Image: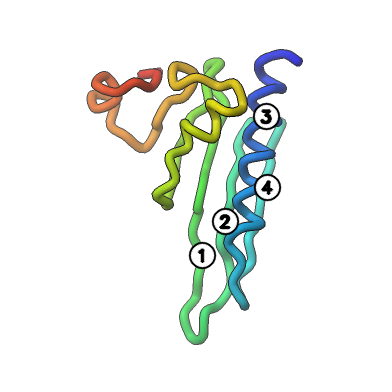
Amino acid sequence: MDRLNHYRQCIRDFLNHYSQLWRENGVENQIIFDSEHDHYLLLKAGWAGDQRIYYPVFHFDIKDNKIWVQENTTDIELDKDLEEMGISKKEIVVGFHHPLMREHSDYATV
């Protein structure tokens, strides 16, 4: 399997796994796979009582031969899950960190 397809499959597996763990009455887990443009999201959408719930839990992009983590609203350390799937920190860009901050991490800068 080439790298791009490996990244896609790993992200799909990751999102499918976590979408099954967090289930709430009235709140739907929506997984969005855009393989044409390489955007992948897990969203929460619905109602908890009178409160509207809508937010991204995870948002991944694949660009420049790297996995970009655009959003992670959890305390899950993604690198551990991705490393178990054969993806190193140097293949992951933490897109929600400022570019200067990325230079001081173990992750890819771009």
The mark that comes first in sequence, 2 or 1, is 2
Q: Is 79 or 36 nearer to us in this picture?
A: 79
Q: Which amino acid type corresponds to the residue marked 4 in the rendered image?
A: Asn
Which residue is drawn at the image coordinates 56% and 16% (left, top)?
A: 65
Residue that carries the numbered disc 3 in the rendered image: 8
Which residue is drawn at the image coordinates 69% and 22% (left, top)?
A: 6
Q: Which amino acid type corresponds to the residue marked 3 in the rendered image?
A: Arg
Q: Which amino acid type corresponds to the residue marked 2 in the rendered image?
A: Leu
The mark that comes first in sequence, 3 or 4, is 3
Disc ID at residue 54: 1
Q: Residues within 10 Å of mark 1 (few under 14, many from 20)?
A: some
Disc ID at residue 16: 4
The local secondary structure at tag 2 comes to strand
Quarter of the picture containing the C terminus is top left
Q: Which amino acid type corresponds to the residue marked 1 in the rendered image?
A: Tyr
The local secondary structure at tag 3 comes to helix
Residue 2 x, y percent position in the rendering? 72, 13
Q: Residues within 10 Å of mark 4 (few under 14, many from 20)?
A: some
The mark that comes first in sequence, 4 or 2, is 4
**Looking at the image, do the residues carrying marks 2 and 1 touch, with CB atoms under 8 Å apart?**
yes
Residue that carries the numbered disc 2 in the rendered image: 43
- The residues bearing labels 2 and 1 have C-alpha atoms spaced at a distance of 7 Å
Q: Residues within 10 Å of mark 2 (few under 14, many from 20)?
A: many
Q: 54 left or right of 31?
A: left
Which residue is drawn at the image coordinates 46% and 80% (left, top)?
A: 51
Which of the 4 quarters of the picture holds residue 85? top right
The local secondary structure at tag 4 comes to helix
Quarter of the picture containing the N terminus is top right
- The residues bearing labels 1 and 3 have C-alpha atoms spaced at a distance of 24 Å
